[in-house]
Image (cartoon, helix red, strand yellow):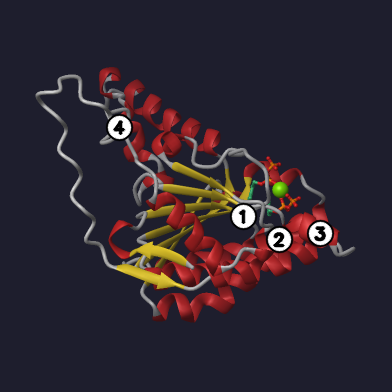
Amino acid sequence: MVFVEARNLPSHVGIIMDGNGRWAQLRGQERVEGHREGSKAVRRIVRAARRLGLRALTLYAFSEQNWARPEDEVDTLMVLLRDFLLSERDEILDHGIRLNAVGNLGRLPGLVRGVLDPLRNDSASHHEMTLTLALSYGGREEIAAVARELATECANGRMRPEDVTAESLRGRMPSLAVGDPDLVIRTGGERRISNFLLYGLAYAELHFTDALWPDFAEADLYEAIESYQRRERRFGLVGKGAVPVSPEAPTPPAPPSEATRLRLVG
Ligand code: IPE
Ligand code: IPE
Ligand code: MG
């Protein structure tokens, strides 16, 4: 049984959807079959996230480095992306989801832009949940793009170098328009970040699972959120569990949580 507290949900969840290729290879199939199955998992998890009430979900669907994969794999991924956007269009619009995309979108083929751009546009005023697809995305590339922007403004006198701060950088990162990620999940067994949301990751909670992305089920999402809810986020401060220095001034115990518990059967 998995318990998810309704009041302590991570606001922004990021997912590194990894393991499609291995899922197919384990079955003696071509890697692209794993991507096909992976797109079904995307539908499932977007729906679960919406029902749970997450404010923002960012899915790492294609990295800037993934362009260097074999051409037929890249082509299939682009077709699957277009098909996903076409088939989910009504569901996205009917449920008040805002669809956004971050990354070097100019590199995406016309067949993707032709469905992505109208859907971004048509859902721009929605605010039930923001679904961001990281496409042709790289965390380092995003930081470099913002640095370039700030350097240009400083060079033409519209900004002073001393105004280049951690916060001003953060404010210009497209991937952080929905806030820093609270929880980042990586499927597929690898314990690495692979250039995802680097700047925003500063205080994100990380959850790694061996489940390959096509096998990632609603229950796995709930489990990741439950794990997040058991953690104490300290942001560099002193935690509630810290022993007080002076015995005369004990730290008051934390009030019992009155949060409603949603029972989500896994
Ligand atoms: C993730 O699965 C999908 C993309 C990166 C586009 P992979 O294709 O990386 O699958 P593995 O890691 O090789 O199994
Ligand atoms: C990360 O997975 C990128 C996406 C999930 C889109 P990769 O499979 O590309 O990352 P590495 O190669 O294992 O680091
Ligand atoms: Mg991979």
Of residue 156 and residue 185, the one placed in the foreground of this image is: 185
Which one is closest to the eye, mark 1 or mark 2? 1
Q: Type of residue at label 4?
A: Ser
Marks 1 and 3 sit apart, C-alpha to C-alpha, by 14 Å
How far from the left and from the top, in percent, is residue 158?
27, 28
Q: Mark 2 and ligand 1: say if the CB distance to the nearest ligand atom is below 8 Å.
A: yes
- Callout 1 crowding tier (Cα within 10 Å): few <14, some 14–19, many ≥20: many
Q: Mark 1 and ligand 2: say if the CB distance to the nearest ligand atom is below 8 Å.
A: yes
Marks 1 and 2 sit apart, C-alpha to C-alpha, by 13 Å
Q: Earlier in the sequence, mark 1 or mark 3?
A: 1
Does residue 256 appear to the left or right of 141 in the view shown?
Answer: left
Q: Type of residue at label 1?
A: Met
How far from the left and from the top, in percent, is residue 262?
36, 70
Marks 4 and 1 sit apart, C-alpha to C-alpha, by 29 Å
Find residue 77 and name its label.
2
Question: Which secondary structure lies at badge 3?
Answer: helix
Does residue 131 appear to the left or right of 78 in the view shown?
Answer: left
Find residue 216 and name its label.
none
Q: Type of residue at label 2?
A: Leu
Q: Are marks 4 and 3 in contact (CB under 8 Å)?
A: no
Q: Are marks 4 and 1 in contact (CB under 8 Å)?
A: no
Q: Earlier in the sequence, mark 4 or mark 3?
A: 3
Marks 2 and 3 sit apart, C-alpha to C-alpha, by 11 Å
> Which residue occupies 9% across, 23% down?
248
Which one is closest to the eye, mark 4 or mark 1? 1
- According to the picture, the residue beneath numbered tag 1 turns out to be 17
Does residue 58 appear to the left or right of 160 in the view shown?
Answer: right
Marks 4 and 3 sit apart, C-alpha to C-alpha, by 41 Å
- According to the picture, the residue beneath numbered tag 4 turns out to be 168
How far from the left and from the top, in percent, is residue 89?
50, 76
> Which residue occupies 63% across, 65% down?
81
